[in-house]
């Protein structure tokens, strides 16, 4: 509805800011031209907007699958895929054709209904979650009042889908992979959600567009007022970043797949298009969780420096998305995989306390604010020690606890 | 016509189903499933009376549901911790095998 | 009303499956489906926040806990044959049917309820938050204490189990070093009965 209002007084349809909503607007204009009823126009507009987002991110999925392989190859001093098309650019197409034409195998001991439902259920939440993120000043596909809550609510289905995949396959490796995946996702979802509480406290709203609007402006004329540039936001941002890597099952937390240990985890018994769906869900979830992190801590679609407002806002969002995802690739290329006990201990002994500490820090930050909303020295003097001292203590304890200890294998060597 | 009687019938059927599960199941975890069903039935009642009952400006109905959800989560966590402790001792989740009190 | 007419048979069917199906994993998944459908109904009648919280907590936490403990205890595949004994069924029905009849009877007698002509409007998040932290602040504090206690309790359970298993291993090791191939060590490691789904 706001879109229809904007057509009268807002920027022109062809402004770069409106480019991502062009398909939606065109469909609506076309339907209005043919005299379609109001509800049909609105519904078709929503569907087109959703399809635009899905299309953009499916393209991003294809591109990322190539970029990831190329980047990893360069880090490991290889060339990577370079046969299909110029510079290997057609490799995603070749992969897609291969996946689509592979035989779809359902094991004899599998429960076919759950086995079929799991890949669908794993893609659906990622797509739903992508729908509430504000990509640009004028481009939030579904502006929900409870956007943040919606994001995490639909995320709950991912765990269920992983369990269904692991259990319905009726085999050992999927079961082990599902157990690892569920325990990891439950453990890291806790700090992930708790770190967002601070942002919600500061903003006073669960709507993601409000959270972005709250980060408008610059300190001292050049430092953006993003949440990451506050003490509590910095701590919460780091915790959120690590937890999002674990939620997306990326290296170094890719134990659920663990190719060298349990074949492919919960995806072992899948082939063909269903296997591709798992990967699609994983990459779309990666986009969604990084998009949420950008929205919460990195100022969403806002320009990083003053005077850059002439660039369309959604370009800034996708630029930040590229930076975050490339950092994921960098981490994947350089870190070894952690062990499951290290993973769990890290979640409960490091991530959870640090995530919980951001809540009082954010509260103090609100209460020490000046009446005009700026923050004096008092806020920094109270929140920085509150976060820094536990961080140092936890680091020291944790380093002591996980440093290599002498282990005796009593049964293995006899 | 107000859908209140229909909602109440639905919730009482759900409650009865949950009770039946608690009474007849032998696996402790499935008894927990029945308990969750009964919680859910009570929540449906709260929401139904908030929505279709007398005016509720203080949002007592949704409040009750929020707290019931919080308590159900806590109850499930502790219940499952106890079940796992029992499982470590007896290697079973069968209620008929959890009848001895010594570790 | 339409949402209720569509959703209530589905909710009932899913709950019936959760109660009746023999394999525990199916029952747990159908419990999750029941809770999801209930959340959808909450969303449909304007209790958005409650519906989303129900999805997040029940599906994301409670159903996952149940499913996960089924995985850990390896009881996900054990069909409950004995529970289908006629005697159990009869006793169960004899206990539950009166409850159902009393409930239905009281619903049918409740003609003197205030007329629900004015449906309560959907509430905003600000309204809910204000009510939560003014009128119901003591309850919030109580729940906070409860959740903290639960967290500590669950951690103690887990820690206690861990400590006892370490202790058992340690005692085993010492016995092993003093007397190689000591019987108790071997029984300790092989005492677990074979799990039923190891076929």
Image (cartoon, rainbow, N blue to C red):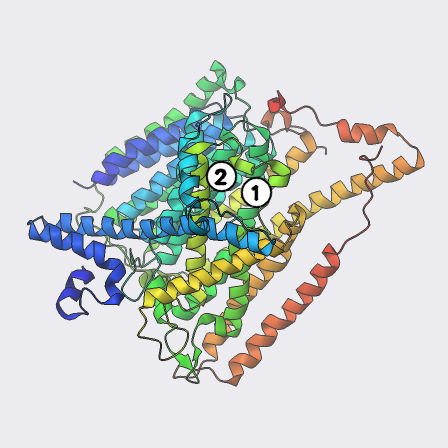
The residues bearing labels 1 and 2 have C-alpha atoms spaced at a distance of 10 Å
In the picture, measured across the screen, residue C172 lies left or right of residue B91, that is: right
Closer to the camera: disc 1 or disc 2? 1
Residues A408 and A258: in front is A258
* Residue A205 occupies quadrant: bottom left
Disc tally is 2
Q: Chain ID for label 2?
A: A
Residues at marks 1 and 2, common chain?
Answer: yes
Image quadrant holding the C terminus of chain C, namely top right
Let me know if residue A90 appears in the view.
yes
Which quadrant would residue A144 be assigned to in this image? bottom left
Task: Report the chain holding disc 1.
Answer: A
- Name the residue carrying label 1: A256
Where residue C30 sits: x, y (%)? Answer: 42, 32
Task: Decide which of tag 1 and tag 2 comes sooner along the chain.
Answer: 2
Would you say the residues marked 1 and 2 are in contact, meaning their CB atoms lie under 8 Å apart?
yes
Instruction: Report the residue marked by disc 2.
Output: A162
Q: Position of residue A219 (x, y in %)?
A: 43, 82
Q: Position of residue C163 (x, y in %)?
A: 74, 46
Picture residue at 79% right of the left edge, 39% below the top: C168
Circle 2 packing at 10 Å, graded few (<14), some (14-19), many (20+), is many
Image position of C97 with respect to A388: above or below? above
In this rendering, is residue A318 above or below C192? below
């Amino acid at each position: 509805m706001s879109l229809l209002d904007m057509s009268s007084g807002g920027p022109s349809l062809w402004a770069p800011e409106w480019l991502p909503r062009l398909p939606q607007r065109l469909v609506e204009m076309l339907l209005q031209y043919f005299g379609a009823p109001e509800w049909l126009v609105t519904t078709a507009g929503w569907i087109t907007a959703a399809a635009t987002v899905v299309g953009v991110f499916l393209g991003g999925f294809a591109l990322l699958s190539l970029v990831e392989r190329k980047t990893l190859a360069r880090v490991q001093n290889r060339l990577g895929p370079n046969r299909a098309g110029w510079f290997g650019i057609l490799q995603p197409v070749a992969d897609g054709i291969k996946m689509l034409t592979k035989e779809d195998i359902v094991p004899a001991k599998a429960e076919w209904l759950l086995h079929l439902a799991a890949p669908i259920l794993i893609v659906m939440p990622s797509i739903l979650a992508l729908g509430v993120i504000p990509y640009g000043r004028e481009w939030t596909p579904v502006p929900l009042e409870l956007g943040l809550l919606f994001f995490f609510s639909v995320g709950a289905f991912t765990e269920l889908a992983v369990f269904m995949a692991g259990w319905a396959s009726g085999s050992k490796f999927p079961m082990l992979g599902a157990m690892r995946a569920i325990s990891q996702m439950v453990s890291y979802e806790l700090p992930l959600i708790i770190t967002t509480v601070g942002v919600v406290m500061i903003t006073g709203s669960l709507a993601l567009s409000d959270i972005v609007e709250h980060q408008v402006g610059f300190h001292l004329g050049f430092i953006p007022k993003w949440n990451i540039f506050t003490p509590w936001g910095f701590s919460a941002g780091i915790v959120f970043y690590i937890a999002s890597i674990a939620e997306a099952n990326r290296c170094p937390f890719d134990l659920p797949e663990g190719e060298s240990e349990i074949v492919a985890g919960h995806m072992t018994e899948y082939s063909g298009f269903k296997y591709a769906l798992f990967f699609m869900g994983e990459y779309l979830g990666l986009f969604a969780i990084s998009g949420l992190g950008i929205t919460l801590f990195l100022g969403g679609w806002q320009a990083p420096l003053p005077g850059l407002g002439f660039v369309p806002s959604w370009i800034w969002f996708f630029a930040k998305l590229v930076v975050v995802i490339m950092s994921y690739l960098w981490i994947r290329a350089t870190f070894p995989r952690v062990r499951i006990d290290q993973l769990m201990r890290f979640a409960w002994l490091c991530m959870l306390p640090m995530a919980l500490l951001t809540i009082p820090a954010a509260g103090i930050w609100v209460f020490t604010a000046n009446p005009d909303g700026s923050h004096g020295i008092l806020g920094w003097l109270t929140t920085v020690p509150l976060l820094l001292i536990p961080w140092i203590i936890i680091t020291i304890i944790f380093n002591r606890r996980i440093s290599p200890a002498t282990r005796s294998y009593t049964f293995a060597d006899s | 016509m107000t859908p209140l009687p229909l909602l109440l019938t639905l919730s009482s059927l759900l409650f009865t189903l949950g009770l039946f599960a608690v009474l007849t199941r032998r696996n402790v975890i499935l008894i927990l499933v029945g308990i969750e069903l009964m919680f859910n039935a009570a929540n449906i009642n709260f929401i139904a009376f908030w929505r279709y009952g007398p005016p509720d400006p203080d949002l007592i109905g949704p409040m009750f549901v929020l707290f019931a959800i919080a308590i159900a989560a806590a109850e499930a966590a502790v219940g499952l911790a106890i079940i796992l402790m029992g499982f470590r001792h007896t290697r079973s989740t069968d209620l008929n095998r959890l009848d001895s009190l010594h570790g | 009303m339409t949402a209720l007419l569509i959703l209530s048979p589905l909710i009932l069917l899913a709950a019936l499956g959760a109660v009746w199906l023999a394999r525990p994993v199916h029952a747990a998944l159908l419990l999750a489906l029941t809770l999801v459908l209930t959340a959808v109904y909450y969303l449909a009648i304007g209790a958005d926040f409650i519906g989303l919280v129900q999805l997040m907590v029940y599906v994301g936490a409670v159903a996952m806990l149940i499913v996960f403990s089924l995985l850990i205890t390896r009881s996900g595949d054990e069909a409950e044959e004995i529970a289908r004994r006629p005697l159990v069924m009869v006793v169960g029905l004899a206990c539950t049917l009166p409850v159902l009849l009393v409930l239905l009877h009281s619903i049918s007698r409740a003609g003197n309820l205030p007329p629900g002509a004015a449906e309560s409007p959907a509430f905003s998040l600000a309204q809910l938050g204000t009510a939560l932290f003014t009128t119901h602040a003591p309850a919030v504090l109580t729940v906070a204490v409860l959740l903290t206690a639960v967290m500590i309790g669950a951690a103690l359970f887990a820690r206690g189990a861990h400590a006892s298993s370490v202790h058992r291993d340690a005692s085993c090791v010492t016995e092993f070093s003093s007397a190689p191939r000591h019987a108790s060590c071997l029984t300790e490691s092989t005492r677990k009965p074979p799990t039923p789904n190891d076929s």
